[in-house]
Image (tube, rainbow, N blue to C red):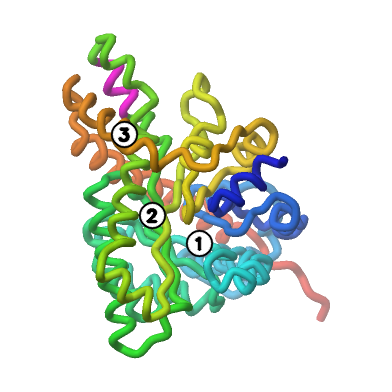
Amino acid sequence: MNPLNTLSDAGVSIWLDDLSRERLVSGSLADLVARDRVVGVTTNPTIFAKAITSGDAYDAQIRDLTARGVGVGEALRALTTTDVRWACDVLRPVYDATDGVDGRVSIEVDPRLAHDTAATIAEARALWWLVDRPNLFVKIPAARQGLPAIAACLAEGISINVTLIFSLARYDEVMNAFLDGMERARDSGRELSGIGSVASFFVSRVDAEADARLHKTHTAQAAALRGHLGIANARLAYQHYERVLSSPRWQALRGAGAHPQRPLWASTSVKDPSYPDTRYVTELVAPGVVNTMPEATLRAVADHGEVPADSVRAHYDDAQQVLEGLRTVGVDYVDLVQTLEDEGVSKFDASWEQLSGQLADTLSTVRPARTRG
């Protein structure tokens, strides 16, 4: 049996962590949806920076933007929302067939706004209006200032993908913001079934940072912990998720028609080539989760992934022992995950700044196509 079918049958929604104009024009995304059980798409500033600066797929739209004298910020929104709107239309049948659970496409607010609550809310509203599709997710980073923005947007009926989650404590705050936002939406009379949310918990980046710190301790005990924190951290996050699902607050929202805020495993390509290339998929199988993968990881799973029925819920004690082992060898978990959160926002900032600069240069040099008078 195709491992992707097995993964989907186990309750994991397979999303593609990539989007480009070329993928849309060629029909590649539609093929992945039709043949490979892909039921969603995630994007980020780094993905768009690579897409827009590669090839000529965006040239015609950039010429039009140049002819209109559009500024860099508006041009970036136009380019990215065009792709996301198109992808939403490709995924719309999935959205309809799953009652709005899947068939979602994510677009991120300008990451430079991550520490400004009011600006993040305003940007989320603008993206929701620009894309104008019910199967959109607006991505908001899980920085502390983003938490009230997450709740406020959900309260207004904007579906949210909370991104850049590394910490179990932060994840608890994210889930509380979700519950708060949905309760406010319910109390204002909104239809809850149309408001969606996922919480993107990053995996491989955790191992990359932890492994670097463990290597510096030069002990056998530390070496034995290499490559274990990312999966252990995610497994414990799922345990926290299960606790929320059993809470009276969630049960009340469920009774009002709400869908749960599903955990989404992000950063699922291995950073260390010595690790199996499917490990952040096959080791995190549990019902009701999303796994968003670059196409190379998706192809690896399809080719040789060994997918169990569940690789999470029987391992909570083992996962907790990994965290305790880190403490024993002197690796500070709280500092590690905070470093990753700060770096995550900074890396997306850098991608956005780089893309803005390149687009500014292009807008100043591209000549509009001539028309016959």
As shown in the figure, which amino acid type bears the numbered disc 3? Answer: Ala
Q: Residue at x 76, y 57 (%)?
A: 27
Of circles 3 and 2, the one toward us is 3
As shown in the figure, which amino acid type bears the numbered disc 1? Answer: Ser
Q: Is residue 334 above or below residue 354?
A: above
In which image quadrant can residue 133 be found? bottom right
Highlighted magenta segment, given as a residue range: 210-216
Circle 2 residue: 163
Predominant secondary structure, magenta span: helix
Which structural element holds mark 1? Answer: strand
Q: Which mark is residue 106?
A: 1
Q: Is residue 345 visible?
A: no
Q: Which mark is residue 34?
A: none
Report the front residue among 36 and 122. 36
Report the front residue among 158 and 301. 301
Say if the magenta span includes residue 214.
Answer: yes
From the top left corner, tell me how far across and down residue 184 is, in percent.
Answer: 28, 80
Give the spatial CA distance, label 3 vs label 1.
30 Å
Contact, mark 2 vs mark 1 (Cβ under 8 Å): yes
From the top left corner, tell me how far across and down residue 274 is, in percent.
Answer: 50, 19
Q: Which mark is residue 319?
A: 3
As shown in the figure, which amino acid type bears the numbered disc 2? Answer: Thr
